[in-house]
Image: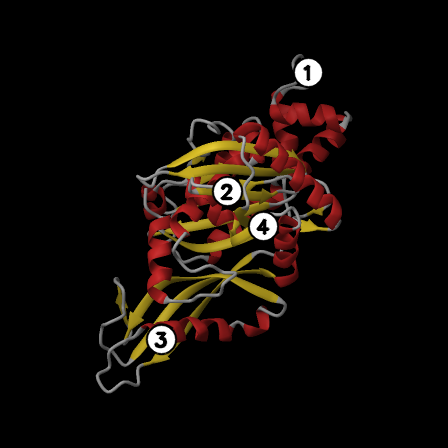
Amino acid sequence: MNKNIITGIDLGTNTIKIVVSELDDNNSIKILGVGTSKAEGLRNGYIVDMPSTVKSISRALDNVVKNSRLRPDKAYLSIGGISLSGLNANGTAYIRHSDSIITEQDFNNSLSDASKKLANKLTNKKIIHDIPIKTSIDDEVALCNPIGMQGSKLESKVLIVNALESHIDDFVSAVEDTGVEVVDVTAAPLAASFSSITTPQKMQGCMLLDIGAESTDIIIFENNMPIFLKVLPIGSNDITNALAIGLKVSIEEAEQIKKGSLVGTKYTETTINKIISKSLTNLFQEIKSILRELDNNTMLPSGILITGGGSRLNNIEDLIKTNLKLPTKVVYADEKQIVGNPEFTVSYGLCIWGANSENASTTIQKMKAYMLKIVTWFKQFLP
């Protein structure tokens, strides 16, 4: 296959989403085709029935072939689900060289020290990303690459993104059982951010809510870097269930009412919004708690950005804005083949991640060279 094909696979609880793209000579990404299928064998982001999940992925790949006339042989894969989390830690490395020059190994030692401090929280977990948020040399913040600078102590504040090792292994096995090699994995909220949030929004400070069927991914950016990541077991299915119970209608009717697509309903918008708002109470409380725990300087001038299938909820912007008192906007990838389809935010974001990572280190290969790490992360957050 002569083309530089990059594929993103998002294993959602309700739907498998695949985007196949091509990276041209100008490093521009062109979508060649998409494929979806109803997801079977997954619950809360976990694989509970491997054969059914493999069949679901195969059906999505068959749909890709129909749309693009090619079948990918390798792909980038997102990791989501409630086992995914981001933990903050500070790592320290003391510079022992006679010239006090900081090396790549010193920097890697500071990252490793951060991971060691979280050892008791990482049992049975695998680190997907260790993202350097801030570095300090002799207690002074270094706003540039510290390698080559002089000092006696290097400190790194790190966001350690992790998930259950068995969860990651199951996802990789399910995809590779279809004959597609997994090149690398990345956290779903990060993948979503690559395709839906602008650099100015990340610089100013923003929160991305990726609302899925059974969970909501939260990632917060400040100064163009992700500083917080969490997955909550709250999704759009909770809203459907609340409407079905509150209005005494079928699940199918409740789903249509949720999206505002049921014409002639006898229920008022006020009644519907009241039920939806109540069903999201736990989500609102969690977000308020998160914001309280973060540094007081985290003001989120760019507000809350919403994506994922749950962003199709009627009046979702107004509901969140009213409850959280922050600017709110629905976002999605603007590539013309998927514009207006927030369900593809993660899978297209994986293509962007893959385009910028083709020659960089991968999680699966466990390459940890600092310069490659910095180049990779820097590229992800360019406009």
- Of the numbered discs in the image, which one, if any, rests on residue 253? none
Residue type (three-letter) at the residue carrying disc 1: Thr
Tell me whether the residue at label 4 lies in contact with that at label 3, contact meaning CB atoms closer than 8 angstroms: no
The picture places residue 365, in percent across and down from the top left corner, at 49, 63
Q: Residue at x 54, y 35 (%)?
A: 70
Residue visible at 61% across and 28% down in the picture: 273
Query: Mark 1 or mark 3, which is nearer the start of the sequence?
Result: 3
Please report whichever mark, 4 or 3, sits nearer to the chain's N-terminal start. Answer: 4
Q: List x then y, in percent, for residue 255.
A: 68, 27
Q: Which residue is mark 4?
A: 80
C-alpha separation, residue under disc 4 versus residue under disc 2: 17 Å
Would you say the residues marked 2 and 3 are in contact, meaning their CB atoms lie under 8 Å apart? no
| Disc on the earlier residue, 4 or 2 | 2
Amino acid found under the numbered disc labelled 2? Thr
Q: Secondary structure at mark 2?
A: strand
Q: Earlier in the sequence, mark 2 or mark 3?
A: 2
Q: Which three-letter amino acid code belongs to the residue tagged 3?
A: Gln
Rounded to the nearest angstrom, the CA distance separating label 1 from label 4 is 36 Å
Q: Which residue is mark 1?
A: 265
